Image (cartoon, rainbow, N blue to C red):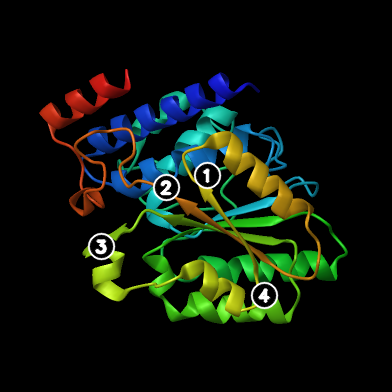
Amino acid sequence: MSASELKGIAHDLRFDIVKMIGEAGSGHPGGSLSCADIMTALYFGGVLKHDPQNPKAADRDRFVLAKGHAAPALYAALAHAGYFPVEELITLRKLGSRLQGHPDSSLVPGVEVSTGSLGQGLSISCGLAAGLKINNDDHAVIALLGDGECQEGQVWEAAMFAAHNKLDNLIAIVDLNGLQIDGRTSDVCDLGDIRAKFEAFGWETSEVNGHDIEAVIGVLNDAKASRNGKPHAVIAHTIKGKGVSYMENQASWHGKAPNADELAQALEELA
């Protein structure tokens, strides 16, 4: 797929993210928009081995959305990849919809595990990666974490476990947009040099512009190919609310929906 086609898909994901959250009247636009390019790289850039026609195929990589509140980004990617109709996206958070505020693996095809409690996703991913190792299965496990999520102690317990057990089939992507619900991560609980932290825990690390889709694809493919006994952390530098001018770099858009006028402006910008 060409670079322009990938950018077009990322654009479509952002449009649908904003539209479904606006229609629902609730949701998390900031962190969903910041990871749209990463989701594009995973599902449309050839990084993630997956099959929309057989979501539970044994011959697949596993993706875990540790930052489960960014479910709209995952739903948009799954719909455009063919796991369910794109028209269903508009049912986000509505009564009776399977597209809940956080992803539910028992309801939505393509959702590997239910997530939402921050800090647990990387631990689950470690379990999946360890299980694949035990079964001599060479497929990868990729987890997407928020930077605010990395303030959770369980993340670092999982990081220690992964290095100790040489889970080189595990990749953790950190969506480093610098903001969380209460403000800047540096003000709430400073992460410091997060790349150095992962390295101190025994991980291989890379950094990338999380909005450069081709660069993200390259880094992730390199991480998948590197089987040197170490898990791999990819620090993706992103902008919260990317693509909507009034949402960009604004912590206030972590977890609220645009009103009718704001939605119209956002959709016009993304049209």
Residue at 52% x, 43% y is 38
Is label 2 in contact with label 1 (beta carbons under 8 Å)?
Answer: no
Indicate the secondary structure of the residue bearing disc 4.
helix
Q: Can you tell which mark lies on residue 162?
A: 4
N-terminal label among 1 and 3 = 1
Graded by Cα atoms within 10 Å as few (under 14), some (14 to 19) or many (20 or more), the crowding at tag 2 reads many
Q: Horizontally, is 205 left or right of 130 in the view?
A: left
Graded by Cα atoms within 10 Å as few (under 14), some (14 to 19) or many (20 or more), the crowding at tag 1 reads many
Q: Is residue 156 above or below residue 112?
A: below
Q: Label 1, on which residue?
A: 108
Q: Label 2, on which residue?
A: 71
Label 1 vs label 3, nearer the camera: 3
Where residue 3 sits: x, y (%)? 58, 24
Where residue 101 sits: x, y (%)? 35, 50
Q: Can you tell which mark lies on residue 184?
A: 3
Where residue 121 sits: x, y (%)? 52, 65
Residue at 41% x, 47% y is 238
Is label 4 in contact with label 2 (beta carbons under 8 Å)?
Answer: no
N-terminal label among 3 and 2 = 2
N-terminal label among 4 and 1 = 1
Where residue 192 sits: x, y (%)? 40, 73
Indicate the secondary structure of the residue bearing disc 3.
strand
Mark 3: amino acid: Arg
Label 3 vs label 2, nearer the camera: 3
